[in-house]
Amino acid sequence: MLSSSGTLAFSTTVTTNPTLGGLILTSNRAGVVGLQTAVFLLEAGYNVTIVAKHFPGDQTIEYTSPWAGAQWRPHSTVDEPEQCKWDLETYEHLMSIIKEEGNHESSRDLPKSGTSPHPPTNVWFSQLVPSFRYRDNIPPKTVGLPDHTNVSGASFRTICINSTAYLHYLLARATSLGAHTLRRSLPTTSGLKAALDDLSTTTLPSPISAVVNATGLSALALVPDPNVYPIRGQTVLVRGEARAAVSLERGATASSPESVSYAIPRPGSGTTVLGGTKEAGRWTAEAEKETTAEILERCRALVPELLTGVGREGRMEFEVVDECVGLRPGRKGGPRVEGEWLSVEGGKDVWVVHEYGHAGGGYQNSVGSARKAVKLVGEGAKGRNRSRL
């Protein structure tokens, strides 16, 4: 089974094993990073309660994960070794699931090709994923570029994820392992301490002694962390599943800005996500018609097999199912996955593991990031036990 990225609702609670007492996983949406962490905590013997404002099946701009294109396409570079490690761990984990169960409705092993006006160099995973090869002298017309354009790229085996199905899978996996769920919105604007004090008034399966703060964009006000910011992404969902995942990076020119176009099939859904935009600092929730038109035009050459509708003057067009907007949880300095002690009401110290700021890499970071978070939870338990000696 594979999962999609997204943000958790303000609190996903996780209760603990006997060595830790009570553990709470907090977030604002039950997204891929938090849900994956909950699953691993449960598998490690913790009792988990997921406290969230939004759960799989909800559709709101506050809930990032369902809107994700959701494929394995690393944004990490050789200068970010920890994120590279997370990406590879996620790839291997998802591939192992596919091998065990075959292509699941929520994920599929598919060809992936990426092209760029600039030759790809120093791709850190070139020796680590199947069928990787560099491609030079790609005919410009095959990707919708002018004849004089130099186009090169790479292809490899990737994993595409039906984000909605994957989120439901992760939640079902968590509940089958004994997770409790609590739909609740906490006062994120008053700080993490106030949110935990508020939650302490709720009857939970066990006392809170540790917290996984997987709050996504809410960490901006909740922690507060001024390094957190939105990265607006607009996509178009069209009818039909593309034969492969495709992306095209276009460098800036005198007449147009830098852009990335992509097509990501959603396995089992009969649809494909076309994109997209990466607009740092924008909070606009509504889809913009001009942007939709630009995305559709840019993607025509990438997946011509999906041009099944007939538009004006007999021109073949995409059949648009939906226009989507999501806000990726960006963070200056990259994801924050680390622990700290926090004093709450009554003078009690709670071990907080922060896990947020994955930007557009939530799905492909999720397994590696979650494993680190689980390790940090264990370190907090050891620290608590040592303090009692």
Image (tube, rainbow, N blue to C red):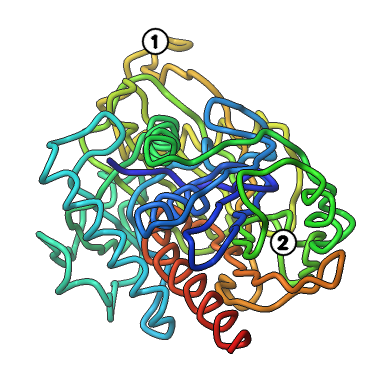
Task: Residue at 60% x, 80% y: name it.
Answer: 384
Task: Residue at 82% x, 67% y: name it.
Answer: 344
45 in relation to 58, above or below: below
Labelled disc at residue 14: none
Mark 1, residues whose alpha carbon is within 10 Å: few (<14), some, or many (≥20)? few
- In the rendered structure, the answer to whether residue 34 lies left or right of residue 166 reads right
In what quadrant of the picture does the C terminus appear? bottom right
Residue ID for mark 2: 229
Quadrant hosting residue 353:
bottom right
Measuring from the top left, give residue 304's x and y in whole percent: 28, 30
In what quadrant of the picture does the N terminus appear? top left
Task: Pick whichever, 91 or 75, lies toward us.
Answer: 91
Mark 2 belongs to which amino acid?
Tyr
Task: Pick whichever, 335 or 294, lies toward us.
Answer: 335
Mark 1 belongs to which amino acid?
Val
Quadrant hosting residue 24:
bottom right
- In the rendered structure, the answer to whether residue 226 lies left or right of residue 122 reads right
Check the image and name the residue furthest to the front: 389
Quadrant hosting residue 267:
top left
Q: CA distance from mark 1 to mark 2?
A: 40 Å
Task: Residue at 32% x, 15% y: name it.
Answer: 308
> Label 2's element?
strand
Badge 1 vs badge 2, beta-carbon distance below 8 Å: no
Measuring from the top left, give residue 347's x and y in whole percent: 85, 72
Task: Pick whichever, 158 or 201, lies toward us.
Answer: 201
> Label 1's element?
strand
Mark whose residue sits in front, 1 or 2: 2
380 in relation to 72, above or below: below
Residue ID for mark 1: 310
